[in-house]
Amino acid sequence: MKTDIFKIMAIASTFAMMLFAPWLVADAKINGLMGTSFNLTARTGTIYTGEGNIIHVWGYTAGPKMQYPGPTLILMQGMPVTINFTNNLPVATSIVFPGMDVTATGGTTGLLTNEAAPGGVDEVTYTFTPTRPGTFIYYSGTDMDLQVEMGLVGAIIVRPMGFDHMMPETWRAYGHDDSLYDHEYLILETEMDHRIHSLVKQGKYNEARAIDYFPVYWFINGRNAPDTMLNDFHPLFPTQPYGGMVMMHPGDNVLLRIINAGRDLHPFHTHGNNFEIIARDAILLESVPGVSGADLKVSDFTTSVSPGGTEDAIFHWTGHGLGWDMYGHSPEDPPEMGEDPNDHGKPFPVIIPEQQDLTFGDMYSGSPFLGVAGDLPPGHPGLNEAAGFFYMWHSHNEKEMVNNDIFPGGLMTMLVVLPHSVPIEH
Amino acid sequence: MRTKYIPVLILLAVLSIVAFALPNRASGVEYFLRADTVVVNLPGGVNVTMWGFALENAFGETSGTVICPGPELVVPSGDNVLTIHLDNNLPEVTSIVIPGLTATMTPVRRPDGRVRSFTHETPSGNTEAVDYTWNNVEPGTYIYQTGTHPGKQVQMGLYGVVRKSFSEDGSGGEVYENVDYDSQKVIFFSEIDPVIHEAVANEEYGTGLTVTSPIGYKAKYFLINGKVYENGDPALPIGGVGQTILLRFVNAGLKTHSPMVNGLETLVVAEDGKPYKYPEKRFSMTLPAMKTKDVLIAPSTAGTYVLYDRRLYLTNSGSAPGGMYLKLSVND
């Protein structure tokens, strides 16, 4: 009977996702904390999983409430950073910043770095200067086998010199134009074995460690599908502020900052088109560093980022190769912005049956054409008001597309290609 | 010169010609290895029976220590030929293969046709050495391992590293052409599932027995250079500030590992003994089973750097800290 309840909850959750149709308030920036000085605290809290479970989690936060993952720190290349860290967990903890040259003061010396004592009794200060732009990661440097699992992970983005959020022509991930983008998204991958979290909540750390690790939850930005498709800071998820819905217009370049904050490999797969990996561990893939641009970039449709590592990829989509005009143009119509000219005016290859001969999915707009909302039968929820194209992006380790054995869920989200008439805000 | 020395000189000349005419021993390196059983002590009073190799001076000797991973087999820069003379003191047949190096392979099959050994076997208790030869050893880092019943024998511990540099200059050299280093260390990842080892030791491994195969493999111990981490372990000296230090990462375990060095980034210069055209600067990496990666680090500050497995195999049978932490010390 428990399973039935979960199924109902999963369905309810899916409906909740649809009610808050995300693309109508399309918000495509990576939210996080900008600046050079941060006060972070490790706290305990709970998160909600896609099928409605509640898991005890440890996370970094800049506020009074635990969050998972920790705040995305958005830094500027060359600007020194100070992180004042306190610990409200029941055990000592710390932060490490791979790829950064960190000085740690305060607290007590741990195996990897300085650790803050439990109960908020002391403070550790981590200082470093990000010397190069790119996508980085931070996580616990204390008892990592337990603490990374418990949720002590977060993302770091370092903006290159000359980056100005107000000037889209400066939106580069790296110093080179090969990293120019129109929208950027964070894909931070993790997994959890909830039995460990239950035991930790009871203070049974040794028992938690003795478990044969078997994760059953997989996350993008701290949420399972379908919750990944809800907005950042959605009120249903007070401790999981970051969504994972990817939105773009045809012809846009989408920067994916993919981070593997977990311990397993998650083969992240994009439907719709290949992406081009332009950087790994915040190093542009170039034959002559600083000179040649991303000439060693790799076109691929699935990537397994090393645990503890990052990759940046550019995803581009025009509808190229469809073989029909996705706008439903006649040959004499003017082209749309970003349209692939090869298919301009080519007819849709199927005679669309009469309405009474069709079954309508909830996300069908009423027409096969981008941005063209057609007639829908009475009672249809009309969830795809903008008439976008949806592509599932997910871990291609198929078992990772569930929430504790319930499909769909897990490490999965959607790309929605929106017509240019629907703005994507930053 | 007095004439009475002439016959001596002629004799010496003839001898030197004869010496040159003999098979050129100087172009090859040879090792006598003894495959044998060893009991390894793990934290918590756990003793695990492993199979490993000992380095001997000659066939039949038993003065070497059986270790796991086995002895580092160094092929000098000027040598192309590696020969291993194997003495098998294990209770069953074994053999040696080196993935990535070419050799004439003569597989041995079971009566039903399935391959038992990838190449010729050394019987248990052999009375004369069985030789394994590789004639074209390229610079790089390789794993030698058993080529017999690898599902059982590899996880029992029959593996070690073969390394060769393009050129050598004291403790440094070029690992590949134009890839310089000042000092080097092998960082060898391996794992132990004690349940399988106990079954093998008690002759309870095999068809119809307690453990029938490695299908239920669940490693509980995660080792670097043959040792799990324990509190208080000393740091491994790897070199000094200003030096380029070559770390040869090797994974003979069954799982993928992800070595990271806290506070340092690595320059990955090669994989499986093949140099990258464009080395990759990384702070993360994956090291799958049977993979080798050569990486360079260049610490600018003296001190202790902790290498760890970001797959988080960092416990000793559930007790932390343990597993794949390794302290590296860099002096001034």
Image (cartoon, helix red, strand yellow):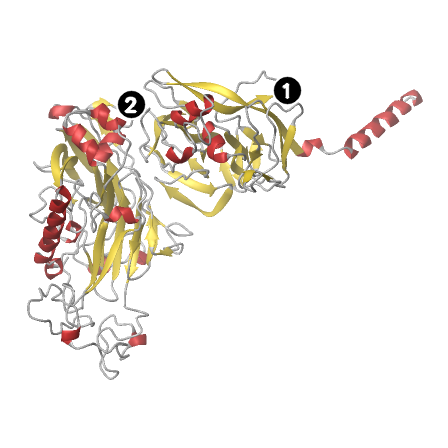
Q: Which residue reaches farthest right?
A: B3
Q: Chain of mark 1?
A: B
Q: Element type at marker 2?
A: loop
Location of mark 1 (residue): B60
Q: Residue at x 9, y 49 (%)?
A: A234
Amino acid on which disc 2 is placed:
Ser
Across and down, in percent, residue B252 comes to 45, 33
Across and down, in percent, residue A399 comes to 28, 46
Q: Residue at x 67, y 25 (%)?
A: B128
Q: Element type at marker 1?
A: loop
Q: Is residue A375 above or below residue B232?
A: below
Q: Are marks 2 and 1 on the same chain?
A: yes
Q: Chain of mark 2?
A: B
Q: Residues within 10 Å of mark 1 (few under 14, many from 20)?
A: some
Q: Residues within 10 Å of mark 2 (few under 14, many from 20)?
A: some
Q: Is residue B59 above or below residue A78?
A: above
Front-lying residue, B295 or B6: B295
The image quadrant of residue B253 is top left
Across and down, in percent, residue A329 comes to 22, 79
Q: Quadrant of the C terminus of chain B?
A: top left
Amino acid on which disc 1 is placed:
Gly
Location of mark 2 (residue): B319
